[in-house]
Amino acid sequence: MESRIRSIFLRAMQTLLVGMASLLSHTLLAQEPVSTQGEQVIVPELERRTIQEPKIDTEDFEVGVYAGALSVEDFGVNPVYGARLAYHVTEDIFTELTVGTTKTSKTSFELLNGSIQLLTDDERNFTYYDIGLGYNLFTGESFFGKRAFNSDVYALGGIGNTHFAGDDHFTWSIGAGYRFLPNDWLAIDIRVKDHIFSSDILGVNKTTHNIEVVGGLSIFF
């Protein structure tokens, strides 16, 4: 009887020890990183960064000044200066108002005949006003060194008025330009523009082409 009780007690102890060993082994395995082909897998600790989205300006108006040279047909090339106000309807389309003025030179006929004056001093003032529509043909980036800046190549067309030789002339204007933006509020602009109107100043009615090349600065607001 005593040997039977001892045998039952030993079996119970053996079962208890086996259960405790199995539980301990499962616990240790759960705490160890999973390994692949005998190598320990490294679990990286990723540090989350705070990302700040750039603010995109929404200014649509642009105001600027410009200066350059205007070739008035039959009256030479003279300095011109002016101002412009533009409204950007979309990213590609804009409208603008421009006003510019120059004082023309004497014609070759006047220079050869000093006693003849075709125009008075006031009549030599060439002033134009026009409203135009512009379209950005190529929008991209210009690189200076390692820095990239936004830029546009655009086309222009418009109508307006030119006051010259004491008279007003209905004027068509066409042109093209290059706009370079060092930042989000300043623009550097270079453009070529032709002011086209009919004139009979020299006694013959003809269509004149008056081409200007100017550069300017403008700000967005």
Image (tube, rainbow, N blue to C red):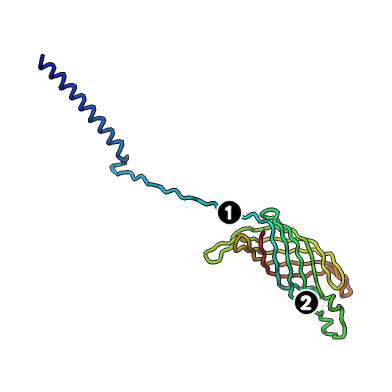
Secondary structure beneath dot 2 equals loop
| Quarter of the figure that contains the C terminus | bottom right
What residue is shown at x 81% (from left), y 69% (from top)? 208
Answer with the quarter of the image where residue 158 lies. bottom right
Of the residues tagged 1 and 2, which is closer to the observer? 1
Foreground of the two, 84 or 209? 84
The amino acid type, in three-letter code, at marker 2 is Gly
| Crowd band around label 1 with a 10 angstrom C-alpha radius: few (<14), some (14–19), many (20+) | few
Q: Position of residue 127 (x, y in %)?
A: 80, 70
Q: Position of residue 46 (x, y in %)?
A: 41, 47
The amino acid type, in three-letter code, at marker 1 is Lys
Answer with the quarter of the image where residue 95 lies. bottom right
Determine whether, in the image, residue 149 is placed left or right of residue 13: right
On residue 76, which mark appears? 2
What residue is shown at x 20% (from left), y 24% (from top)? 15
Answer with the quarter of the image where residue 108 lies. bottom right
| Crowd band around label 2 with a 10 angstrom C-alpha radius: few (<14), some (14–19), many (20+) | some
Q: Position of residue 102 (x, y in %)?
A: 77, 73
The residue lying furthest to the left in this view is 2
Residue topped by disc 1:
55
Q: Position of residue 201 (x, y in %)?
A: 87, 73
Foreground of the two, 57 or 177? 57
Determine whether, in the image, residue 58 is placed left or right of residue 163: left
Secondary structure beneath dot 1 equals loop
Which of marks 2 and 1 precedes in the sequence?
A: 1
Mark-to-mark CA distance, 1 and 2 = 48 Å
